[in-house]
Amino acid sequence: MKKILCVDDDLSLLYLYKEELSEEGYKVILAKDGKQAMEKFREQKPQAVVMDIRMPLMDGIETLNAMLGKDRQIPIILNTGFPEYKQNYMTWGAEAFIVKSSDLSELKQKIREVLEKREKLGKPSSATSKNYRKKSRPRPLLEERIDGF
């Protein structure tokens, strides 16, 4: 089951995310600010992040950069009520930018897209990474095999 970390200071919106995204088959992890998001990001290792920009303690832009510093491949979707941030170069590291709406169909579609794109690029989800590493381990050179006997 893919894990989605949802970060927003609006608790009612977080619960809407949890309800709607759980119905889509995701395990939803909630965080109310960037600081809490970073803790859950390290502990839970989600496959994607949905995040607001304006939040207390640690805003979405700061959190975006911190997460990308830990994992350059993590797809982060900025979901905010402030469309002017789309032009801010500090948000360009995000995989997608969506203006908040009570209709989550655009957000759900974008989550599916970024997860599919990640899988096509060969970045394993944490659930499959053990098998992926085992299968993708390079074979030793002939000389190394001979020296090992």
Image (tube, rainbow, N blue to C red):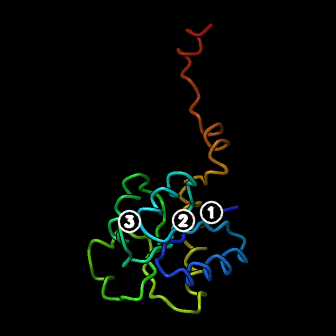
Q: Is residue 144 above or below residue 135?
A: above
The percent position of residue 53, horizontal first and vertical second, equals 38, 77
Question: Residue drawn at (55%, 8%), measured in percent from left and top?
Answer: 147
- Structural distance between the alpha carbons of marks 3 and 2: 12 Å
Left-right relation of 110 to 59:
right
Secondary element type, mark 1: strand
From the image, tell me which residue sits under label 2: 48
- Give the total number of marks visible in the rendering: 3
- Structural distance between the alpha carbons of marks 3 and 1: 17 Å
Disc 3 + disc 2, Cβ < 8 Å: no
Question: Residue drawn at (65%, 36%), measured in percent from left and top?
Answer: 134
Q: Earlier in the sequence, mark 3 or mark 2?
A: 2
In-front residue for pair 26/54 = 54
Determine which of the numbered discs, if any, sits on residue 56 in the image: none
Amino acid type assigned to the residue bearing label 3 in the image: Leu
In-front residue for pair 78/44 = 44
Toward which corner of the image does residue 141 lie, by quadrant?
top right
From the image, tell me which residue sits under label 3: 64
The percent position of residue 42, horizontal first and vertical second, equals 50, 52
Q: Earlier in the sequence, mark 1 or mark 2?
A: 1
Determine which of the numbered discs, if any, sits on residue 3 in the image: 1
Secondary element type, mark 3: helix
The percent position of residue 25, horizontal first and vertical second, equals 72, 71
Q: Is residue 18 above or below residue 34?
A: below
| Crowd class of label 1 (few under 14; some 14 to 19; many from 20; radius 10 Å) | many
Amino acid type assigned to the residue bearing label 1 in the image: Lys
Toward which corner of the image does residue 27 lie, by quadrant?
bottom right
Question: Residue drawn at (67%, 51%), measured in percent from left and top?
Answer: 127
Disc 1 + disc 2, Cβ < 8 Å: yes
Q: Quadrant of the N terminus?
A: bottom right
Left-right relation of 53 to 36:
left
Amino acid type assigned to the residue bearing label 2 in the image: Ala
